[in-house]
Image (cartoon, rainbow, N blue to C red):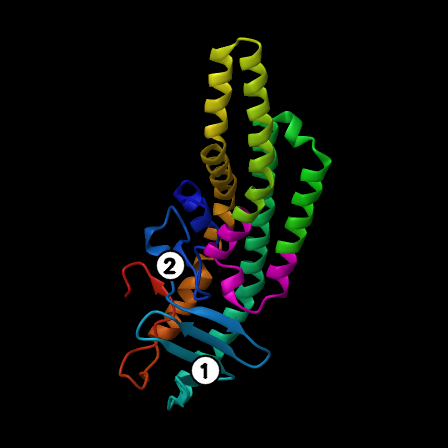
């Protein structure tokens, strides 16, 4: 999906140490949050992976911390911090998944609204509505079952909504093309040109509508700010460093790099 919807999508999961990036709290510039890591949640551990060079895999497990397979020596205070980080990060996961699922619902609603506004005939097509319903159910089930932030973060939701757009754009475009042809056959060349112009604007108009829908999630994103700051405070308070000499930095708040 091109950049017209990017702002709204950043609002969606612009959130946490769970592999997201963006602004959580539009009115609070100090709550700009991002992470360079993806998160995998297992029954016993949290695994943070950074694909960008230099690649890194960090694992937290009941107060222990390992970096690329090497355990970090931790004092009692740091072990408590890691344990609390694990607990608080796990508590965020259901909220992140719920936001992603809400994003899918809002995106699909925007697609329906755009179809109704642009091509009422397409909007009442039972096949289209059944397809959109099935796709939303599948995407939300995928998010619910996933243990990886790769399935709930912004780029994933963008892919999901782009897939849903493929259900409606060909039908709307086909209906408008037929309308333009009918107008041309009646000799209404100006009307045909107007309909053709309308068809060319379907995708950008749809993306803008999705953006507006997703922006309604901003208050829910804002409410995550305290949890994000808490994670950042916990890792910033670590006395131990990683084997490469760097400090633990899974969550970046504001100007923190």
**Secondary structure category for the residue under label 1:** helix
Report if residue 88 is visible in the image: no
Pick the quarter of the image with the C terminus: bottom left
User: Residue 170 or 134: which is nearer the viewer?
Assistant: 170
Give the Cα separation between the discs numbered 2 and 1.
23 Å
Query: Mark 2 = which residue?
Result: 33
Q: In this view, does 30 lie to the left or right of 221?
A: left
Is the magenta region chiefly helix, strand or loop? helix
The circle on residue 55 is: none
Query: Mark 1 = which residue?
Result: 80
Q: Where is residue 34 in the image (x, y as percent from the top left)?
A: 37, 61
What residue lies at 59% left-to-right and 66% top-to-bottom?
146
Quarter of the image for residue 247 reads bottom left
Among all residues in the image, which is located at the extreme front? 185
- Above or below: residue 173 compared with residue 62: above
User: Residue 161 or 35: which is nearer the viewer?
Assistant: 161
Q: What is the count of numbered marks?
A: 2
Between circles 2 and 1, the one closer to the viewer is: 2
- Above or below: residue 122 compared with residue 27: above
Among all residues in the image, which is located at the extreme top? 187
What residue lies at 34% left-to-right and 69% top-to-bottom?
52
Report if residue 220 is visible in the image: yes
Q: Position of residue 89 (x, y in %)?
A: 50, 69
Quarter of the image for residue 168 reads top right
Magenta-highlighted residues: 140-161
What residue lies at 50% left-to-right and 35% top-to-bottom?
206
């Amino acid at each position: 999906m091109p950049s017209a919807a990017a702002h709204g999508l950043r609002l969606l999961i612009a959130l946490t140490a769970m592999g997201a990036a963006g602004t959580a709290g539009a009115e609070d510039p100090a709550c700009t949050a991002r992470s360079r890591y993806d998160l995998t949640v297992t029954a016993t551990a949290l695994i943070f992976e950074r694909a960008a060079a230099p690649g890194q895999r960090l694992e937290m497990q009941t107060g222990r911390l390992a970096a690329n397979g090497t355990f970090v020596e931790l004092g009692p205070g740091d072990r408590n911090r890691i344990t609390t980080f694990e607990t608080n990060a796990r508590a965020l996961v259901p909220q992140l998944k719920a936001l992603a699922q809400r994003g899918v619902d809002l995106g699909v609603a925007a697609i329906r609204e755009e179809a109704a506004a642009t091509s009422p005939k397409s909007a009442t097509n039972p096949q289209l509505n059944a397809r959109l319903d099935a796709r939303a159910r599948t995407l939300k089930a995928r998010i619910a079952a996933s243990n990886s932030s790769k399935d709930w973060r912004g780029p994933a939701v963008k892919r999901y909504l782009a897939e849903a757009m493929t259900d409606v754009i060909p039908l709307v475009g086909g209906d408008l093309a037929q309308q333009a042809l009918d107008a041309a056959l009646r000799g209404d060349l100006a009307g045909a040109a107007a309909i053709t112009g309308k068809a060319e604007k379907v995708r950008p108009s749809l993306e803008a509508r999705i953006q507006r829908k997703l922006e309604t999630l901003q208050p829910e994103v804002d409410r995550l700010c305290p949890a994000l700051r808490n994670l950042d405070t916990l890792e910033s308070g670590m006395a131990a460093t990683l084997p490469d000499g760097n400090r633990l930095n899974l969550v970046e708040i504001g100007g923190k790099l």
